[in-house]
Image (cartoon, grey):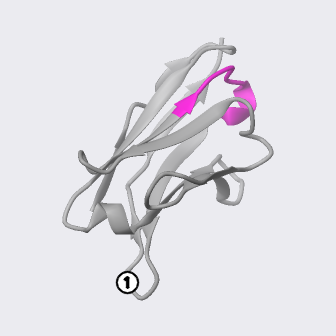
């Protein structure tokens, strides 16, 4: 099970840090990704981090503003979001994937960027 938290309402230019807590899986063996879905849009991949945390990838929309990280000892993943824009408004989800194992999704946390 994955549980996201940390969403909320923030003004343009502000920051938020999303958290993803993992339960019942060998967290350190999973690639963790963040996705988002705005109303009326398709789900969009945002960022990815490898099991050991050494490699990260970002969508162009997130590069330079968002940072994905993880703490395997705490079974936690994070998405630090800076310089937020209204177009970042979406429901944000974390996903855990490991080859040959079930894929896990969280229930999402809402991020709203508005003045």
Side of 100 where 80 appears, left or right: right
Residue 103 vs residue 112, the one in the foreground: 103
Residue 59 seen from this side: yes
Residue of label 1: 101
Estimate the x, y position of residue 91 in percent, counting from the top left. Answer: 53, 44
Side of 59 where 9 appears, left or right: left
Residue 25 figure quarter: bottom left
Mark 1 Cα shell of 10 Å, populated few (<14), some (14-19), many (≥20): few
Side of 90 where 83 appears, left or right: right
Residue 60 vs residue 3, the one in the foreground: 60
Residue at x 51%, y 24% (from the top left corner): 16
Quarter of the image for the N terminus: give it: bottom left
Estimate the x, y position of residue 40 in percent, counting from the top left. Answer: 70, 53
Which residue is situated farthest in the left direction here? 24
Residue 86 figure quarter: top right
Does residue 26 show up magenta in the picture? Answer: no
Quarter of the image for the C terminus: give it: top right
Residue at x 19%, y 66% (from the top left corner): 24
In the picture shown, does residue 3 fall above or below 10? Answer: below
Estimate the x, y position of residue 19 in percent, counting from the top left. Answer: 38, 39
Residue 89 seen from this side: no
Side of 23 where 6 appears, left or right: right
In the picture shown, does residue 105 fall above or below 69? Answer: below
Residue range of the region highlighted in magenta in the rendering: 80-88
């Amino acid at each position: 099970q994955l549980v996201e938290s940390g969403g909320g309402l923030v003004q343009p230019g502000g920051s938020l840090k999303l958290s993803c807590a993992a339960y019942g899986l060998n967290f350190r063996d999973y690639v963790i990704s963040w996705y988002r879905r705005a109303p009326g849009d398709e789900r969009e991949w945002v960022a990815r981090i490898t099991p050991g945390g050494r490699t990260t990838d970002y969508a162009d929309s997130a590069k330079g503003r968002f940072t994905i990280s993880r703490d395997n000892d705490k079974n936690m993943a994070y998405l630090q979001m800076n310089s937020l824009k209204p177009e970042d408004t979406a429901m944000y989800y974390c996903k855990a994937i490991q080859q040959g194992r079930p894929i896990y999704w969280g229930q999402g946390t809402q991020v709203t960027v508005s003045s």
